[in-house]
Image (spheres, helix red, strand yellow):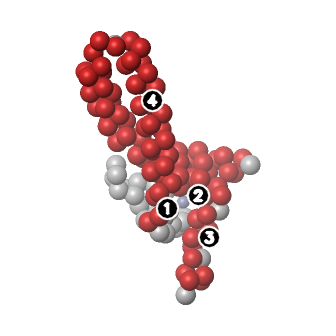
Amino acid sequence: MFEGLLAFWRGLLGRCPNCGHGHIFRTFFGMAEGCAQCGRRYEGTGDQSTGAMGISLTLTLSVGFAGGILVVLYSPDNLTVGMIILLTVLSVFQTLIYRVSRGLWIGLLCVTGAMDEDDHRDEFYL
Ligand SMILES: [Zn+2]
């Protein structure tokens, strides 16, 4: 249980969920292929990023929904300006939440053991 939470937390912070020493990202948007310390591959297939997109979309829609309610409640006379501001905020939020979403997803893959299954995927299909 504690190991799972620790791996999830490491992923959230952008660290390798396996060892906690390597970095998940090389640049702000560029992911490392694997951990430089322990050699754990972060993503074997492209479809693993789908979960991160789901996390990112869910968080952005939640913030957008709450922001939309606030705009309607506190600025009903300036809905156009409020929506433009809200869309701008959501665009910045979506960009900033990218790393968190990817890190959370990789941590989740590590906790559930899906990363281990992906290491053996060629054994099943060849
Ligand atoms: Zn590592």
* Quarter holding residue 26: bottom left
Q: Give how far apart the Cα atoms at labels 3 and 1 are.
A: 12 Å
Ligand 1 found in image quarter: bottom right
Residue drawn at x 46%, y 25% as measured from the top left? 66
Q: Amino acid at mark 2?
A: Leu
Q: Earlier in the sequence, mark 4 or mark 2?
A: 4
Q: Nearer the viewer, mark 4 or mark 2?
A: 4
In percent of width and height, residue 110 lies at 60, 58
As rendered, which of 41 and 43 lies closer to the eye?
A: 43
Q: Is residue 122 above or below residue 119?
A: below
Please report contact status of discs 3 and 1: CB closer than 8 Å, yes or no. no
- Inspect this view and state whether residue 110 appears: yes
**Residue linked to disc 2:** 109
Relative placement, left or right, of 25 versus 112 is left
Q: Earlier in the sequence, mark 1 or mark 4?
A: 1
Rate crowding at label 4 as few (under 14), some (14 to 19) or many (20 or more) other CA atoms within 10 Å.
few
Residue drawn at x 40%, y 58% as measured from the top left? 31
In percent of width and height, residue 13 lies at 50, 44
Q: Is residue 22 above or below residue 64?
A: below
**Residue linked to disc 4:** 65
Find numbered disc 2 in the image and state the secondary structure of the residue it sits on: helix
Q: Earlier in the sequence, mark 1 or mark 2?
A: 1
**Residue linked to disc 3:** 117
Q: Amino acid at mark 3?
A: Glu
Q: Give how far apart the Cα atoms at labels 1 and 2 are.
A: 9 Å
In percent of width and height, residue 37 lies at 51, 62
Q: Amino acid at mark 1?
A: Gln
**Residue linked to disc 1:** 48
Is the CB of the residue bearing disc 1 within 8 angstroms of ligand 1?
no
Relative placement, left or right, of 85 versus 53 is left
Q: Amino acid at mark 4?
A: Phe
